[in-house]
Amino acid sequence: GESVGLHLPTLSVQEGDNSIINCAYSNSASDYFIWYKQESGKGPQFIIDIRSNMDKRQGQRVTVLLNKTVKHLSLQIAATQPGDSAVYFCAEKNSGGGADGLTFGKGTHLIIQP
Amino acid sequence: DTGVSQDPRHKITKRGQNVTFRCDPISEHNRLYWYRQTLGQGPEFLTYFQNEAQLEKSRLLSDRFSAERPKGSFSTLEIQRTEQGDSAMYLCASRMGQVSYEQYFGPGTRLTVT
């Protein structure tokens, strides 16, 4: 069945360093993945997405890598800033007839050290 | 602010009472989603609408839960005979079908059942 999980619940990095957040998924039929950032007391905020026909996608200071062979994706944040402190979720689009919801992992709490 | 609004932002109710939450999506978005998020977990998909049609329901959506989107615009989520286990953040999201899979989330309604 579908499941999305994260390798680390908490990641602490120095301000200015690069951050890498990892995510594993189990459904080889998944064709769309998305990363969200959630700050305390707020709803999830879109960061970047990627379709399964791509290996890499870049945004502003963020890059998502998709390795379909090992069913793994990662989010790289360049030059981490204090405003990047949040919980980061990966999610995959539900598959199957009529399915359209997202299945989220548990999240990684990114902590920025000054 | 994503443009998705939810009301109320917080609700405290006693066990056994009924509660209703409202979501107003981004006006041109034809798809609307409800999720539940408990502390320390990622959002869990509950149901989604395309216009006024409810097309997918999670097994998490017990008989005590009902959702409507009567005119294809705003949506309501009702929980009857609330239980303490219903305490969670209820998130609404919307997207424009055929354009992007990106879902825009509202700030959520925090439900506490005492």
Image (cartoon, coloured by chain):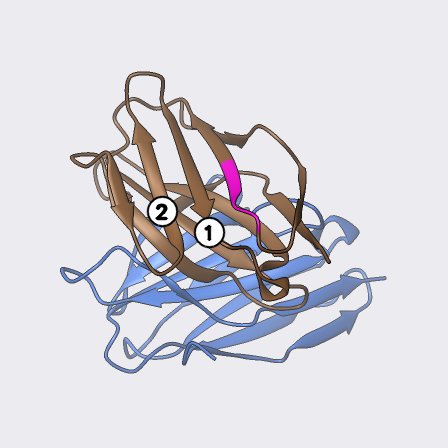
The answer to whether B71 is drawn above or below residue B15 in the figure is: below
Does residue A77 appear in the picture of this structure? Answer: yes
Residue A97: quarter of image: top left
The answer to whether B30 is drawn above or below residue A113 in the figure is: below
Residue B99: quarter of image: bottom left
Decide which of B100, B80 is in the foreground and name it.
Answer: B100
Residue A22 located left or right of residue B108? left
Residue B24 percent across, percent down from the top left: 42, 80
Secondary structure of the residue carrying numbered label 2: strand
**Subunit bearing disc 2:** A
Secondary structure of the residue carrying numbered label 1: loop
Decide which of B26, A97 is in the foreground and name it.
Answer: B26
Residue at 58%, 69% (x, y): give it.
B108
**Over which residues does the magenta segment extend?**
A17-21
Q: Earlier in the sequence, mark 2 or mark 1?
A: 2
Is residue B2 in the magenta section? no
Residue A107: quarter of image: top right
Is residue A18 in the magenta section? yes
Residue at 31%, 79% (x, y): give it.
B73
Disc nearest the viewer among 2 and 1:
1
Residue carrying label 1: A78
**Residue A63: assigned label:** 2
